[in-house]
Amino acid sequence: MVDTRGAIARRIELELDQSFSLARAILRDDGEAEDAVQDACLTAWQRASSLRDPDRFGAWFSRILVNGCRDRLRRRQRQQVRAIALQAEWGGEAGGPDPAHALGGSDRDLDAAFERLDPDHRIVVLLRFWQDLSLDEIADRLDVPLGTVKSRLHYALRTLRTDLEATDGRI
């Protein structure tokens, strides 16, 4: 009998650093990235029997992690909408200074434009330009058609370009 869970545990251990880096890039928060990686590890452990091809572990685990990060981003957006509604209802102001002001001009502008991207668009940009995956690999990792990846990347880059041009933070 094959020790599937033992093999999964060993593979997860090899993927931890890269997985945390990817989750951190998507979520932009160390604590949330740690939680996302931990959740992905638990999910992978529980779904060990769904891994059909052990040679594709990286893509399988990455899909679990990216989907978890996407869910976290969506929950975060819903929470922000509620917070804004409560502030308006109570007449409060948005809190404190913006920490992004500590960054230099175009870096701050790029960071802000990246934050405004839809989670699905942000993930495609990260996988393409940060992890240097091909469009086919991204489609496989996200379990979406190639055309969807191309479309998301196109619109994400167009949105980034428009936002940066509006702030004169051209790359």
Image (cartoon, rainbow, N blue to C red):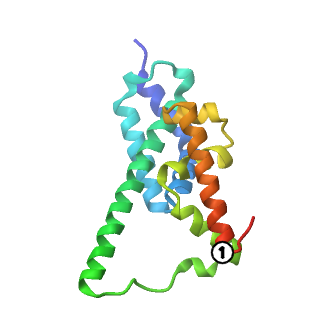
Q: Which residue lies furthest to the left in this view?
A: 89
Decide which of 59, 95 is in the foreground and name it.
Answer: 95
Q: Can residue 58 be seen in this view?
A: no
Give the residue number, with chain letter if any, for mark 1.
167
Which amino acid lies under the numbered mark 1 shown in the image of this protein?
Thr
Q: In this view, does 53 lie above or below 127?
A: above
The residue that appears at 46% across and 29% down in the rendered structure is 8
Instruction: From the viewer's perspective, tell me whether residue 92 is left or right of residue 138.
Output: left
Instruction: From the viewer's perspective, tell me whether residue 104 is left or right of residue 73.
Output: right
Q: Can residue 111 be seen in this view?
A: yes
The residue that appears at 46% across and 33% down in the rendered structure is 9
Decide which of 65, 54 is in the foreground and name it.
Answer: 65
Q: Is residue 44 above or below residue 33?
A: above
Instruction: From the viewer's perspective, tell me whether residue 170 is left or right of residue 32.
Output: right
Based on the displayed image, in which of its 4 quarters is residue 1 positioned?
A: top left
Spot occupied by residue 143 in the image (x, y as percentages of width and height):
48, 32
Spot occupied by residue 10 in the image (x, y as percentages of width and height):
51, 32
Q: Residue furthest right?
A: 171
Quadrant placement of the C terminus: bottom right
Spot occupied by residue 86 in the image (x, y as percentages of width and height):
26, 77
The residue that appears at 49% across and 63% down in the rendered structure is 29
Q: In this view, does 70 lie above or below 150?
A: below
Decide which of 24, 137 is in the foreground and name it.
Answer: 137
Count residues near mark 1 (Cα–Cα under 10 Å), then give few for <14, some for 14-19, many for 20+: few
The residue that appears at 66% across and 49% down in the rendered structure is 130
